[in-house]
Image (cartoon, grey):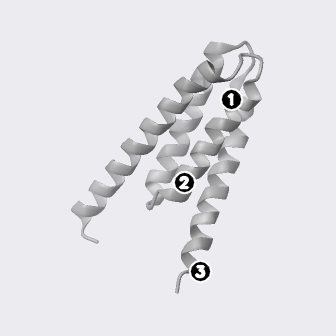
Amino acid sequence: MPAEELRTVIVREVVVGTAALVVVALAVPVVIAADRQALRALVVAVVAGVLSAVLSDWRSRATVVLVAIVVSTAVLRQQSGIDPWHFTPLIVLAWMLGTGYRRLSRHRQP
C-alpha cells in the first residue's frame, strides 16, 4: 500500500473511532444512571474493544484506546466523585482482546 493511501486510511480510522467514542461517552450518562459508574466504563470499554477489532492499523487502534481512556475519565470525573482512572485497566483489557481477536481472525483466513 502506498504511503499516501496508508495515511488516508489511518486518518479516516482515527476520525471515525474518535467520533464513535465521543458519541458513546456523551450518550452513556444520559442512558445509564449516575450510580452505575462501572457500567458506564464497561460500555466505553466494549466500544473500544470492538473498534480495536475492526480498525486495520495498529496506530489507529492505539490512538483510539488513548482517546477512550481520556474521554471516559473526563466524562466519569464530571459525573461523579470517584476516581475514573480505576477503570483504565478495563479499557486496556478490552483493547487487547479486540486486537487479539483481529489477529486470530486474520490468521484463520485461507
**Disc 2 residue crowd, few under 14, some 14–19, many 20+, Cα 10 Å:** many
**Disc 1 residue crowd, few under 14, some 14–19, many 20+, Cα 10 Å:** many
For residue 40, which numbered disc appears in the image? 1
x then y, percent, for residue 91: 66, 42
In the displayed image of the protein, which residue is found farthest to the bottom? 110
Classify residue 27 by image quadrant.
top right
Task: Classify residue 61 as left or right of residue 76.
Answer: left
Q: Nearer the viewer, residue 24 or 8?
A: 24
Amino acid bearing label 1: Arg
Q: Which residue is mark 3?
A: 108
Amino acid bearing label 3: Arg
Mark 1 element type: helix
Mark 3 element type: helix
> In percent of the image, x 56 and y 37: which residue is there?
68
Give how far apart the Cα atoms at labels 3 and 2 are: 18 Å
Q: Nearer the viewer, residue 44 or 30?
A: 30
Classify residue 69 by image quadrant.
top right
> In percent of the image, x 30 and y 62: which residue is there?
6
Q: Which residue is mark 2?
A: 52
Give how far apart the Cα atoms at labels 3 and 1 are: 33 Å
**Disc 3 residue crowd, few under 14, some 14–19, many 20+, Cα 10 Å:** few
Above or below 67: residue 11: below
Badge 3 or badge 1: first in the primary sequence = 1
x then y, percent, for residue 4: 22, 61
> In percent of the image, x 72 and y 42: which residue is there?
90
> In percent of the image, x 59 and y 80: which residue is there?
108
Q: Quadrant of the N terminus?
A: bottom left
